[in-house]
Image (cartoon, coloured by chain):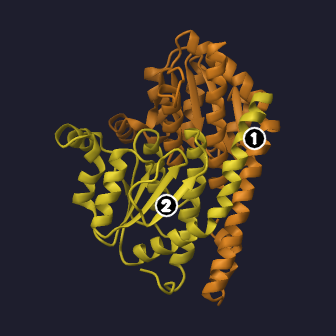
Chain colours: A yellow, B orange
Amino acid sequence: MDEVAAALERRVGPGSVLVEDVDQVLRACQDMAVRFRRGGKLIVFGSGGAVTDAQHVAVEFVHPVIVGKQALPAVSLTNDVAIVTGIAGSTGLDDIFAGQLRLLASPEDIAMGFGQCAGVLRGLAVARESGLLTVGLRGERDVPAEPVDHLLVVRSDDPLVVKEVHMTIYHLLWELTHVFLEQPEPEGAR
Amino acid sequence: MTSDFAMLYPFLYGTANGADVLAQARASTEEKIAEIVALRRSMAALHGEGLAACAKAMAAAFGAGARLFAFGNGGSSTDAQDLAQTFARPPAAGQPVPALALAQDVAVLTALSNDVGYDLVFARQLAALGRPGDIAVGLSTSGGSPNVLNALEEARRRGMITVGLVGYDGGKMARDGRVEHLFVVPSASVHRIQEAQITLYHVLWELTQQALTE
């Protein structure tokens, strides 16, 4: 019992401090809404545990939980094991997302990468070179690296807690993107 | 559910200007963050004992050679995959135990959907894969997904440990004592339910790991 309470208390800090990043989340959503409005799609990726985040994000946008919300184009790059292991075997594990992005991405798209493994970083770098909007979700333990347009960092070094707060962040990203999508294009947006 | 957005963002349906939109979106986002923090915290009183008992039963089962099968639909299928992955490939220094996410086998999933119907996908998989003493974990926000309920039923028939994660008031999953270890997240938001459920099964994993090493 006490162990459960203690485990839950460890979630309070990282969950609460997200409130300081609300403006960053809002800015990401404004930019994402602009991309969708221009016909862009969302391409999501991550390795290991983050695979499930990528797939959860994709289904969130394609099949909204709130009836009547517009279905938005989103794909995760982690579903097709044949392609992933094919790329890993030929051009290397670090190319699994970049290789798919080179084929699938258009400049008006959005690339969302979870975590900071070499494959995700290379994917985000290729996306950025190709003109995509780049969004990175990370944990505190991840060291700063390649620049992305919107970096959202969870302040915890426990990968499970990071994942839990990431879920709140991507639920908010989905919901707020719809809010801005239904508004006139914000001034100064790319 | 259509009116939810109108209720949450009345400005969208009025003539508010951009600044109001931003201010109201900010305020409602801050509320949601506070809501999930409080909801997670409330799980201690609600499910502390249940989690401890479930972890103990699961650790004993793993010790006797059990495998874990996790299943759900949509976002809950990715959560089931996360759950299985956490047990099978734990972060840091955990002890790996056998765990599978049933929705990950697209060939089996589409074969069963095509031939016998989607309502039976997970149940048929458990019938083929499950043994007495194994662990079945079903995730649903509504508690009404027929394939999740059928699979929990099948698991129970086969003498498996049944674990259910559900939202709202528990729906059908909470009826008739059909699930041995039931964790209801009392919220009406699918998003907040999932965010509390991911914490519940992560904590369940932590407790199971502790019990495995005792």
Quadrant showing the C terminus of chain B = top right
Q: Residue furthest top?
A: B64
Write down the residue under mark 1: A9
Q: Amino acid at mark 1?
A: Glu
Residue at the location (36% across, 34% down)?
Answer: B108
Measured Cα–Cα span from mark 2 to mark 1? 26 Å
Using residue B109 as the reference point, say whether residue B200 is left or right of it: right
| Residue receiving disc 2 | A151
Q: Nearer the viewer, residue A145 or B87?
A: A145
- Residue B10 position, x and y percent, is 69, 79
User: In the image, residue A136 lies at what x, y percent?
Assistant: 45, 57
The residue at the far left in this view is: A90
Q: Is residue B108 visible?
A: yes
> Is residue A69 among the parts visible in the rendering?
no
Image position, residue B84 (x, y; %)? 50, 31
Asked whether, in this view, residue A91 is left or right of residue B214, the answer is left
- Which is nearer the eye, A102 or B104? A102
Hey, which quadrant is residue B14 in on the image?
A: bottom right
Element assignment for label 2: strand
Q: Chain of mark 2?
A: A
Residue sitting at 45 percent across and 42 percent down? B118
Q: Residue at x 50, y 51 (%)?
A: A138
Q: Residues within 10 Å of mark 2 (few under 14, many from 20)?
A: some
Q: B177 and B167: which one is in front?
A: B167
User: Residue placed at 47% from the left, 61% from the top?
Assistant: A61
